[in-house]
Amino acid sequence: MKIKTMILLIILFLANNIIVYSLTKINSEHKINLVLKENLDTLSTHYKILLETQKITAIAVYQSTIQIARVVEIMSQASTATEGEKVALRKEFHKILDKKYQILKQKGVLQYQFLFPNNISFYRAHKPSKFGDDLTDVRSDFKYTNKTKKPIRGFVQGRVAHGFRNTFPIFDKNANHIGAMEVSFSSDSFQKYLNNISGIHTHFLVNKNIFNSKTWERNDLVLDYKESAEDPNYMITLNSIHTQAECIVQNREKLKPRRKEIDLKIALGNAFSLYVRHKEHVDIMSFLPIETIDGKTAAWLVSYAEGTTIESTLFNTQVLRIITFFVSLFIVYFLGKLILAKQEIEEQKKSIEEQHRLLDTILSLTDNVMFITDFKDVKFLNNKFKELLNIKDINSFNHSNKHDLLNIFIPTDGYLNRSLLKEGETFISLLSRTDTLNRIVSILDENLEARVFNISVTKSEGRGDYLVTLSDITIMREYQVQTEKKASLDALTKIYNRSKFDEILDNEIEYQKRDTKSFCIVILDVDKFKNFNDTYGHLIGDEVLIKMAQIVGDNLRNTDIFARWGGEEFVILFKNTSLEIAKKVSEKLKDKIEENTHETAGKITASFGVTEYKIGDTRESIFKRCDTALYVAKENGRNRVEVV
């Protein structure tokens, strides 16, 4: 048994270190590849920006050139002129464009050249003394533009120089093709831009096979080429930033460990990045292929950057592996104790499961709905809760409820729900500030019928969970609502009684303190009602009151409040209504009453007193004015409407 255990421990030790080694290798390679990709993407982005900038500059130069009418005229005339005439025209051409070229040189323009449709050179701004040579077999861009009469741009090798060429067709005022012009930029401008503007140390390498000369000269520019350190088949331009000591001698030594890899990837012609460790630090190199307009790789753009992130990743990987080695020893040492601890944990687990079963049994013995929750998820629940919401699986219930218990509480007035929470408030806080009698919630059961429960919550000790008890008071609540409804209605007419009207009126007066909209009160009294009782008896009198309530109620808005004030008097509250409109409605109601007759009592009429709410009014003051208006109506002959 001991031998088997030791073998298992050794296997565990080895497996742990192998796994960590593999994972750290994958992780470090992933991070390094991300850094390499980022450097390559940065180089590519700045290269594209520079290309686009040069494109815009070239187009601007082209457009500004062809807008010079005399330039177009000279090109048109020179194509058919004698050699002597061409000399004069070329001098005039130079006089017009030389200053422009001097400015363009400051923007990195290398060559500013004009050719006839047959690819014979007419004028080179960078070398005015050279002209008349045929560039058909030398410059594929000129050949393409003069043949298709379309512009073209890209990296092109010339007779003695290479560069990023922008070649455009030229037409005379009659749209006749008269030649082509070139605006080109040297590869050296890319090195300068990326080093000085973008802060990226860059080498522009050109395939030595496209060279006829290792030096290209202009009056103000000399490009000196040497074999590059990156690849012996490619040349680099040397200058004050790119010295032979640093860019060739030092780099050649630095790149020795990766020489075969670099040669292979350059031969494949795809963009790539790699890193090299040299003298305790890491350098990142990104290689971006530059293709000619024919699709052949003729140059490479190579950037150099400090690889501090890669250096840090390699160091951290090594540290982690060392730590893992020693941690593994501790794991093996304490494994025996962990096995014993595992047995204890299993026993505790069984005990907890037994407690859970006991708790589930206890919760299921009560008629109340009971469950344990943190108000996000339900942890335990009894059968009553399962039956209430038809819960089959507690995890599915929590998921469908979006892990928020408050979603089961219906947002209805008079019941606790989410809408009552203040900003940042918890349901427990809402419960604590709610009177015990009002701690009521409403829940839709499995049949989508609203059930009403009294809710009580008890916090579990040492945990963030709560025991929630829901006592079903649905029947009691319905009875309470019906009782309250009966208490607010007049027993005879089934409209609001005086007590309910006073409650509504007080609320409306309070509301007016926060709102500028007004309301009106109307008191109407059945004319000579005492005669109905005395002549026909109280039963007929009651029928008159009922009929009166029906007539008025049928002709009011849903927002109007209609109540029996007492005896034969009724009262109406017109919300958001002016005095003028309230009077017109009262006149209409008066006429409707007069149009109806009782089969026994005969004609019924009523008198109306109308008044409007004024700032500072109380219930007593507004009714006093209304009574005064009703009194005036009675005094003036009844069956009329008076306003005070």
Image: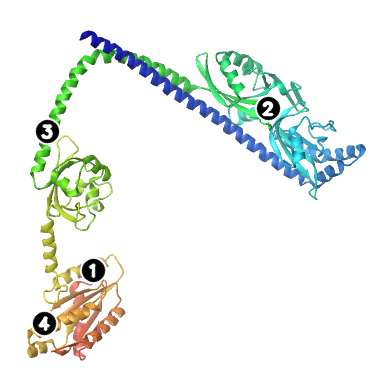
The amino acid marked with disc number 2 is Asp
- Residue at 8% from the left image edge and 43% from the top image edge: 365
* 328 relative to 358 in the view: left or right: right
Crowd class of label 2 (few under 14; some 14 to 19; many from 20; radius 10 Å) = some
Circle 2 residue: 188
Crowd class of label 4 (few under 14; some 14 to 19; many from 20; radius 10 Å) = some
Q: Earlier in the sequence, mark 4 or mark 3?
A: 3
Q: Secondary structure at mark 3?
A: helix
Q: Secondary structure at mark 4?
A: helix
The amino acid marked with disc number 3 is Gln
The amino acid marked with disc number 1 is Glu
Q: Earlier in the sequence, mark 2 or mark 4?
A: 2
How many numbered marks does the figure carry?
4
Residue 533: x percent and y percent?
A: 9, 87
- Residue at 20% from the left image edge and 69% from the top image edge: 504
The amino acid marked with disc number 4 is Asp
Up the image or down, 535 lies above or below 57; here it is below
- Residue at 79% from the left image edge and 39% from the top image edge: 97
How many angstroms separate mark 1 from mark 3 (CA)?
A: 57 Å
Q: Earlier in the sequence, mark 1 or mark 3?
A: 3
Question: Which mark is drawn over residue 508?
Answer: 1
Q: Earlier in the sequence, mark 4 or mark 1?
A: 1
* 145 relative to 415 in the view: left or right: right
Circles 2 and 1, Cβ within 8 Å, touching? The answer is no
Question: Which mark is drawn over residue 355?
Answer: 3
Q: Earlier in the sequence, mark 2 or mark 3?
A: 2
Circles 2 and 3, Cβ within 8 Å, touching? The answer is no
How many angstroms separate mark 4 from mark 1 (CA)?
A: 30 Å
Residue 264 image-quadrant placement: top right
Q: Quadrant of the C terminus?
A: bottom left
